[in-house]
Every structure is written in structure tokens, then in C-alpha cells.
Image (tube, rainbow, N blue to C red):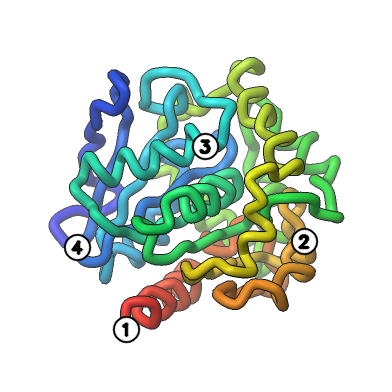
Amino acid sequence: MENNALTTETKYANIDNKQIAYRKIGNGTPIILANRFRGTLDTWDPLFLDLLAKNNTVVTFDYSGIGYSEGELPIDLHEVASEVTKMADYLNFDKYFVGGWSYGGLIAQYATFLYPKRVLGTIVIGSNPMGKNDAPLSPLFLEKALQPTYTAEDIITLFFEPTSEKSSAAGIASLQRIAQRYDESKVPVKPETLQRYFAVTPQLTEDKDNFREGYKTLQTPVLAISGDNDISFAVENWFPLLKKAPTLQHIIFHAAGHAPHYQYPELTTTYINSFIKNTLD
């Protein structure tokens, strides 16, 4: 690997007359990763990215108006998902895997349904399916997630399992790795920007595209990875869909929260690599 998550250059793709920031590491099967609420290029755990890049070309990017990118975050999920495909076009990826964490998991699913001829497979981490889900966002998530900055305690509460010493320790280790390349000034804090993330909620719950029903006939393999104590996207929201979605696999990590791939980067990337290999075989 010529570079890694901590050293690779931030580059810019001219997409729709905007400079969209991205980073690319590794060689092999292309994977484009869509980020969480308030996530930037800097908030990915570098160990998770480096492990994934051992066998794949891993691309992270900032949505329009977020982090290092120009523009404004769209309030239509179709438009946000199109940024994945436009990034693929810019990088000359005809077909690719798409992955997403949290809000990005929603974007990954939209990209899958909207561009089925392009997406080889989908990895959804710490997220939920579209449509009506019975378990809502925890009030604790909303209390913590909207704060201007996060303390270490906030990170543990939001992304890990604070009642587990193992999970909390993994959270601190992940936070220390991320801190090696982290520009806090790039994290969105303006209320009007944060509201643009939440503006898509009606589109998700109404699911006028009928994507939830579309899982019944979806041909694209999907791997969902959840922690059993996810306070933003509850793991049990997947359960009603599992028997109805032939290409969907679901992995649940015990005593883990919203960021199972940060708590278990080695194990998560092993599952993802196996999923990719089986999809391509």
C-alpha cells in the first residue's frame, strides 16, 4: 500500500461545479464509503480504513457542504446518493461496492436501489432500513449528538456501549487513532446545516420509492452490521425485514454500540472482505 489513512492526500473532484473532497487508499475492489451524521474525512477510524484497504481500493468523501467539500448538503436523499455514483464516475469505477455508516448507511441503500447496475454489493453499518421502523432514535442520542463538540464520554455514549469496560476501552483507543488526523474546524456545527440531515426524515419514513418492499426482489447482496446497543439505529429494526430479503445478511456484535467497526475493526473488515469475495466469486 503506497499510503494509508493518516498520510494519504486529500484530493478534490469537480462534481456539479463543486469541489468535493475525497481520499483514496489501497488497491483492489473499489469501495466507496458514505459517512455518518456530522462525519468528515477525518472522523473515520484510520485502522478500520487501513485494514479494509489491504484488499480493496477504499474511497471516503465529504458530502456537499460538509467537511472539506463545497456546496450545501442536499435535503433529498436521491441527490446525496447520486454523489456516490458521481464520485465513482470521476474515479472511473464502472462497478463498485458501496458502504455506509449511520446516515451513510441510508445513503448506501439509496445508491443500491437507484443504481443497481453499478453497485456490486452493499455494506450497511450502524443503520436501519428505509420505511417505518418501530424503535425510534433514543432521546440520549439527540441529547448528545447535537452538541457543538463531543467529549470522550460523549463519544463512548454515542458510539459504544458505556456499561461495558471492553467497549469503552475500545472507544478510547479508536478516539486516539482518529485524533492523529483530525481537524475539528471541519465538523459541521451550524444548526441550519445539522437540520439538513434531519430534513430527510419524512422521505425515509414515507418511503415513497418503496425501497423497503424492494428488498424482497433486490438482486444486490447486502451485509448489515449492527451493535446490540445502538442508541440511534436500533438493531431490532432489521428483524421484520430479514425473512423477506433474500440477499440480506445481518451480523450483530454483542456489547457494542453505534460504531461496531471501530470497536472491532479487525473482525468487521474480515466479515466485509469475506462478503466481497463471496459476492464476486
Mark 4 vs 3, N-terminal side: 4
Mark 1 vs 3, N-terminal side: 3
Q: Is residue 214 left or right of residue 13?
A: right
Identity, as a three-letter code, of the amino acid under mark 2: Asn
Q: Secondary structure at mark 3?
A: helix
Foreground pick, 275 / 221: 221
| Distance of label 3 from label 2 (alpha carbons) | 22 Å
| Distance of label 4 from label 2 (alpha carbons) | 35 Å
Quarter location, residue 97: bottom left
* Relative image position of residue 4 (x, y in whole percent): 25, 54
* Relative image position of residue 100 (x, y in whole percent): 50, 52
Which residue is under mark 3? 78
Q: Secondary structure at mark 4?
A: loop
Mark carried by residue 281: 1
Mark 4 vs 1, N-terminal side: 4
Q: Residue at x 29, y 28 (%)?
A: 15
| Distance of label 1 from label 3 (alpha carbons) | 30 Å
Check the picture and name the quadrant holding the N terminus. bottom left
Foreground pick, 232 / 267: 232
Foreground pick, 43 / 272: 272
Which residue is under mark 2? 237
Q: Are marks 3 and 2 in contact (CB under 8 Å)?
A: no
Q: Is residue 245 left or right of residue 116?
A: right
Identity, as a three-letter code, of the amino acid under mark 1: Asp
Mark 3 vs 2, N-terminal side: 3
Q: Residues within 10 Å of mark 1 (few under 14, many from 20)?
A: few
Mark carried by residue 27: 4
Q: Residue at x 74, y 36 (%)?
A: 144
Quarter location, residue 36: top right
Which one is closest to the eye, mark 4 or mark 3? 3
